[in-house]
Image (tube, grey):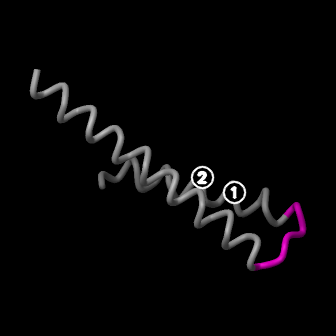
Amino acid sequence: MNQITRDRIVEVRDELDKWIDGKKLRLWQKELILRELLEYWQMETIVEMIKRVQEGEK
């Protein structure tokens, strides 16, 4: 993972933490939201990798 992506992830996570804290959610709710977002991000990354591989095969 390159540094720009890692920095962006940290930035988004910090913003999300502020938003979640403002909602007065319980810890388990916060963890669930973060876990779901991580899974979604991983899926998006995998989809992008597959697209790049398929484009390279053309």
The front one of 45 and 6 is 45
User: Which residue does the image show at 43% across and 44% down from the upper left?
Assistant: 44
Q: Which corner quadrant holds the C terminus?
A: top left
User: Does residue 24 appear to the left or right of 13 in the view shown?
Assistant: right
Residue 43 sits above or below residue 38 on the image: above
The residue carrying pointer 1 sits among few (fewer than 14), some (14 to 19) or many (20 or more) residues within 10 Å by Cα, namely some
The amino acid at mark 2 is: Val
Magenta span of residues: 22-27
User: Which residue does the image show at 88% across and 62% down from the upper left?
Assistant: 23
User: Does residue 33 appear to the left or right of 20 in the view shown?
Assistant: left
Q: Which residue is mark 1?
A: 16
Total marks placed: 2
User: Which residue does the image show at 18% across and 25% down from the upper left?
Assistant: 55
The amino acid at mark 1 is: Leu
Dot 2 falls on a residue whose secondary structure is: helix
Q: Which corner quadrant holds the N terminus?
A: bottom left
User: Does residue 44 appear to the left or right of 10 in the view shown?
Assistant: left
Does the magenta-highlighted stretch encompass residue 46? no
Q: Which residue is mark 2?
A: 12
